[in-house]
Image (cartoon, rainbow, N blue to C red):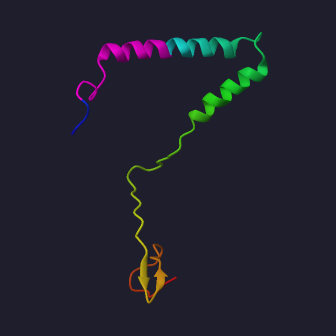
Amino acid sequence: MAGVKGRSGRRPEGVNQKRLKIIDKAWDVVMDFISDPKQPKKERVEIAKTIAAKNIPSDVNIDALVQYTKMGEIIIDDKPKEFDIGATPNTGHTR
């Protein structure tokens, strides 16, 4: 079954618009608090630190044209073998 009737699929656009307005207001409140020198610096730093940590990318793709594929483990004579990606063909180089 694809989902529960009435609760599957995209949210209505009106719901998304309301959600975005609330998020915008929340950001305004946070920015006002962080920018206010009357507020305790320790609290402002904690909020800024939390926001900054969430904006650090967890997966960095430097070159979208390069794909990396890892070969699975190969076992020969009960010993694991590893493919040496740096070896050139027909050199007999192994690890």
Res. 83 image quadrant: bottom left
Horizontally, residue 89 falls left or right of residue 79, namely left
Q: Give 63 or 22, whichever is nearer the viewer.
A: 22
User: From which residue to which does the magenta span run?
Assistant: 5-23
Give residue 15's position: percent from left, percent from top.
35, 15
Is residue 76 depicted above or below 42 in this figure?
below
37 in the magenta segment? no
Is residue 4 depicted above or below 90 in this figure?
above
Is residue 31 depicted above or below 76 in this figure?
above
Q: Residue at x 61, y 28 (%)?
A: 51
Q: Residue at x 43, y 86 (%)?
A: 91
Q: Residue at x 55, y 14 (%)?
A: 26
Q: Residue at x 74, y 21 (%)?
A: 43
Give residue 2's position: percent from left, percent from top.
22, 37
Give residue 89's position: percent from left, percent from top.
39, 81
Res. 39 image quadrant: top right
Quadrant (top left, top right, bottom left, bottom right) of the N terminus? top left
Horizontally, residue 11 falls left or right of residue 1, namely right
Q: Give 32 or 67, whichever is nearer the viewer.
A: 32
- Label tally: 0
11 in the magenta segment? yes
Res. 52 image quadrant: top right
Give residue 62's position: percent from left, percent from top.
48, 49
